[in-house]
Structures are given as structure tokens and as C-alpha cells.
Image (cartoon, grey):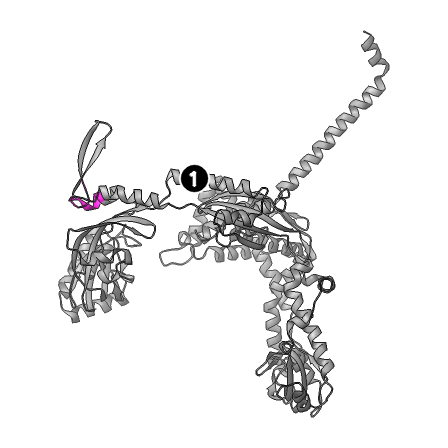
Amino acid sequence: MAILGKIRSQGLILILVIALALFAFIIQGLLTSNGAAKASSLGSVGSTELDREAFGRRVEATMQQRGAGTSTVQAVNSVWDAEVRDAVLKMQIDEAGIEVSDEAVKNQITTMYANAPIFQDENGQFSEIKLNTFVADLKNNQPERYQLWLQDVNNAADQAKQNQFFNLLKSGIIGTQAAGEMEYRLANDNRSFTFVNIPYTSIADSLVEVSKSEIADYVSKNESKYKAQAQRDIQYVVFEDKASQADKDKMKADLAKILPASYEVFNTNTNKTEINKGLEGVTDIETFVNAQSDVPYDGTYVLTSKLPAAAKAMANLEKGATYGPYEDGEYIKIARVEDKKMLMDSVQNKHILFAYAGAERSAATRTKEEAKRLADSVFAITGQNSKKYATQWDYFNKNTEVAKAEDLGWMMSSGNGRSLAKGYRDFLYSNDKGTVGIAESSFGYHIIRIEDTAAPSEAIKIATVAKKVEASKATGKQLFTNAQKFQQGVADKDFAEVAKEFSLEVKPVKSLKALDENLPGLQRNRSIVQWAFRENTDVGETERFETSQGYVIVQLTRKSEEGLMSAEDASATVTPILRNKKKAKMIMDKITATDVNDIAAAQGQNARAATSVNRKNPTIPGVGEEPKVVGTAFGLEQGATSKPIAGEKGVFVVKVTAIENAPDLGNYGSDANEVAQRTANQATSKLVEALKKSVEITDNRATFY
């Protein structure tokens, strides 16, 4: 009771304490939710937030559209560029009040889907009826996909607005007479001059010192050129996941057991030893190979001259002989010679194809039986007669409704002929020059004529059991142990020294950026880059990564945040600039004469001549582009000599020998149009880049991808 009385007496204080606690709880919740929202945001362009889920859908669609060769980061970067472009343009379009008609959106959709087979009629033309039927089906039966379709319509409307915006922009670009005359003069006014060039290379770099403070000062005065993204340097070693020699020997021993005519195997179900047929004695070779090999059976013939080095010796074996075990690239193999014969390696051929419904890449509606009857009827006309075949081939080459005639030219069995369908290939390399016949393949029925053949060569048919060379469990366990020991060792020792102890090569990687994915020697590996850019990853820290190549131990060696380049980072580009400036002054201080020939003699150089040089292409023969030097020459009177000029390649002095101004045209309309056209073509990209610089862009891609 005493306690309750005390609480009542201090009621106001208690209420304040509870209120403050509740307020702190609410504020913390707001801060936490705001932080979470920020962390989950993909980014923003001005006031436009980029929706992460919608962005992710576009990334997936881009990857599907571009195929297996496109990485996630490549797709992300492509979609990001498009999203930023659309966002900055939308701001301008909304501000300008640009709207488009339903007809314009419809035309844009037609353009977007014109090449989609699902919306094409029997003539390959875009069908509005098919499109409307498709959309109606989505609306009635597939509501989720219909919502995606509506998004496509919105995208089409945005694209139509952008097209109108750019058309308005370009329509406001004109080429004036003054601009046209300048264009004409830049290309057609010429100057000829003698010159001397004292190259910067005439002074050794070691004689010119450029300090870090000078580099830093130059960078600070040219900030726009030397803004750098956040970067990381790493070094790594690889504990390669590969089979040991003991692993390979074990694989060879296992394959050697199934090579003879028969071999023993213990059946754990019956607890008895059984006798199985081996590669040498088996009759159904294809089934045996497919059951035992990591590589499917391949019954094609190979020219003995084309056998790989590891299998060359089989060229001398007789039919039925076995070979191996032997190592060939990534596989341990055993083999049996199935057959040997002379083969036409190179065959020149034509064919007439009668396809049917269901055949590969076929749009035909006829049945397989109907296609066979058609092929037989045409073959009955041609027989082995080359002229009759040529008549039929010419007809079906021009009239492809019933059949399609093609000239495949020369096909090599050991080269481009390997891509031919099986039935076609079998006929082609089993018949002589001049033969006409019917062959069936997955594409339909072919009437083939062999136009010509090269000299026959010896070929061999080999049945091969191949096992992929892989590390054993014991080798993998030892690899993991070694990787652990290395990581423990670098905790208190130098990374390179520990690598020497393990006989490993240290591979440095410089200037990684947050969205990089390709590491030299490791190919794509985003996880390493993401680790290097985590806020809590410190310089000197190491981490182990499991990759397809094995265990990779990585150490972070440098962190550089976004902002101006440091003197060290800018040194590679700035040092040559500052060094050449100093060399230019050193060279100019040595020049006391005023005549080109006298200067050349004093500096150990030769005076040279440049003829008919213009400002549009300010190239000096034997030197290269020197716009400052050429521009100076255009500012001199004939016979006048310039003061020393600090050019791109060295210090120049020029004397104008001829002024060749092009005649006045009076009207420069064609040149003005050229200027306008060029400006209009560049306007789109330049405007977008300018708009990007005018807004604040937040980019969190590296957090999520």
C-alpha cells in the first residue's frame, strides 16, 4: 500500500516518464523504418524513386531476351541506363506538357511487336486482329499477364512522347549561313608552312620531376575531369580444385577393368561375383558407352588425319582393337575401333527438301506420308539424270510453296559437315560423285545430288568411354585443409610470404569498382567484389570464397571512396601532362633564334614542310594531330613566323609559306544543312547526358546485385 501511495503522489512525473518512453519508441520505429526504406531503395533520379520490383522484372526480361551470354550485372546496367534516361526525359516531357494520341500509342505498339511471330498473319505481316485477340484473352483469362500488358502500353505511350519530344527538339535546330560558312572554311581553307618540331621525347623523363603536390594542385583545378568512383584493390591466391595424379591413376585403373572382353564385378544384392562384358567384347556398343561414359555415344566417322594427338595411335589399329586408358584434355578415356573405311571428306552438294508438319523448323501442313509421296514422285522424274535434276532444282529454288531447293556447296565431314542432320550426312559421305538419291532427316525428305567430291581419305569410327577428370573426396578435403591453413597463416604474416610457403602465385587486381564482376583469372565473381565494398571490410582483411575453380583467398589491400582522385590515382594521367608542360618550358628557354632553319639547326632537328593543311583535320604529316599548331598557322600572315608553340607532341615553330582560302560561295545552304543535321543527330544523346548532370541521382545497384 505504501508503494501505491508513493506512485499516486508522484503521478505527474510517472506520466511524463511513460510519455517520453513512448515517444522514444515511436521515433525509433520511424527512424528504423526510414532506414529500412532507404536500404531497400534501388535508387532515385531527382524526385523519382526507382521501384526495385519493377526494375527486377525488367532485368529478368532483358536477360531472357539477350540469352545465356548476358550476365545479371550486364542486364542491370542496361536497364539502369534506360530507367535513368526515361526518368530525366519524363521530367522535361511533363514540364513541357507533351501528350500523344491513342493513334500514336497504337503505332508505337505496332512497331514494338511488328516482328513477333505470334502477331503475324500467314504472309508474315503484322496482324492487328491477332493482337486484339491476344489482348482479349489476357484480359479475360490471365489477369496477371494483362497487368504486364498494360505496363507495356504505358511504356509505348512514354516512348511515343519521347519521340515527339525529340522531334520537337530537332525541329528547332537550324543551320545558319554563318555556321555554314564556318563549316565550309574549316574544310576548304588551307595553309602551307615550314616547321620545326622539338619533340618532348628529346628530354629524358628522368630529368623532369613532378611532385605529388603538383599533381594534387592540377587535379583540384580540373575537378570535373578527375572525379573518381569508389574503388578497391585486392590480391588473391587460388587453391585450384583439380585432380591429383593419384586421382587420375585411380580413374585409369577403374576404366582398365572394363576394357577387356569381360570383367568381374561383385553384386552386393546377391553377394556374388558376376561376369560382365567389357568394351572389347560387348555387341551393343552404343548402349554400353552410354551406360559407362560421361560423354554420349558418337557414331560418326573421323578422318584419321584429324584424330587428336592423344588418340593418333588408333589410326594404326585394326577394326575391333581397343586402346587406353589414356588422358585426353579433361577426360580419361578407353576406346574401341568400330570400323575403318575410305570417306569423301569434302562433298559439293545440292538438295530439294520436302518438309512436313512436325519436322524440324517446318511450317508445312502436309503429313509425313504426303511429303514422302511428293519426294518419290519428283525423284521418279529426275532419276540419276543431272539435267532433269537441274530442271527440278531450278523450279523449286524459285517456287518454294511445295519444296525448297538449296545449294549447300562444299561440306567437310570433319568441319562444317558435322552440323548436318544425321540422315543427310550419312547419304552425303557414303556416295560417289554424280549420285542422286532420297535421304530422310529430322527436317523432312531430301532429294540430294552430289555435285563433286574431293579425293577420299581414310576414316575411323571409334566408340569411346570418357570419364571427366575430377578431384576425389580425399583430394578435396586436403584442398580445404590447405586453404584454411593459408587463411590462418595470413592473419599474422605477410600475404605474399605465406603464398610462397604454399607455392602459390599472388594475383593483384587494381581499381575494382562497385559494379565490376569480371576479375582477371577468375571470370565473373560478384561475391568477391561485394565483399570488398562492404563498409565493415577493412584493409588487410582476408576472406575465403568457394568458386568453380577452387578456393580463393582474397585480401583487401586498398580502399578509395568516391570523390576527387588522389595524387597517387591521378598520377598515371596527370604526370605526363605536367611533365610535358615543364619540358615545353625547358625547350622554349633554349630557343633564341627566330628563323625556322636556324632553330632546327640549333636544336638538332630538321626543318620540314606541311602542305595544304586545314582546320577540320588539323594533322601535320609525319607528326599527327596538332590543332593548336595548325590554329596558330591560320592566324599568321604569309611569310610570318610564329613564336614557340607547346603542341601535343613537342614544341613547334612555324612559318607560313602559302595562304589558300577557298572562293566565296555567296550561299552556304548545303553546309548549313550539314551542320544542322549533325547537330540534330547529336542532340538526343547530348541532351540526355546534360539532363543527368542537372539532377541528383542516387545509385544503390551494388547493394542488390
For this rendering, which residue is in front, 173 or 571?
571
Q: Position of residue 143 (x, y in %)?
A: 49, 40
Q: Residues within 10 Å of mark 1 (few under 14, many from 20)?
A: few
Residue 703 visible at all: yes
The outermost residue toward the top is 1
Which quadrant would the N terminus be assigned to in this image?
A: top right
Q: Is residue 287 magenta?
A: yes
Picture residue at 61% right of the left edge, 64% below the top: 684
Q: Position of residue 540 (x, y in %)?
A: 61, 46
Find numbered disc 1 in the image and state the secondary structure of the residue it sits on.
helix
Q: Amino acid at mark 1?
A: Gln
Location of residue 393 with respect to 696 vertically, above or below: below
For this rendering, which residue is in front, 303 or 361?
303
Location of residue 335 with respect to 583 vertically, above or below: above
Q: Quadrant of residue 192?
A: bottom right
Location of residue 457 with respect to 329 vertically, above or below: below
Q: Position of residue 137 (x, y in %)?
A: 44, 43
Q: Is residue 422 left or right of residue 191?
A: left
Q: Is residue 16 magenta?
A: no
Would you name the residue on which mark 1 appears?
Answer: 478
Q: Which residues are magenta?
A: 277-288
Residue 74 visible at all: no
Picture residue at 22% right of the left edge, 57% below the top: 313
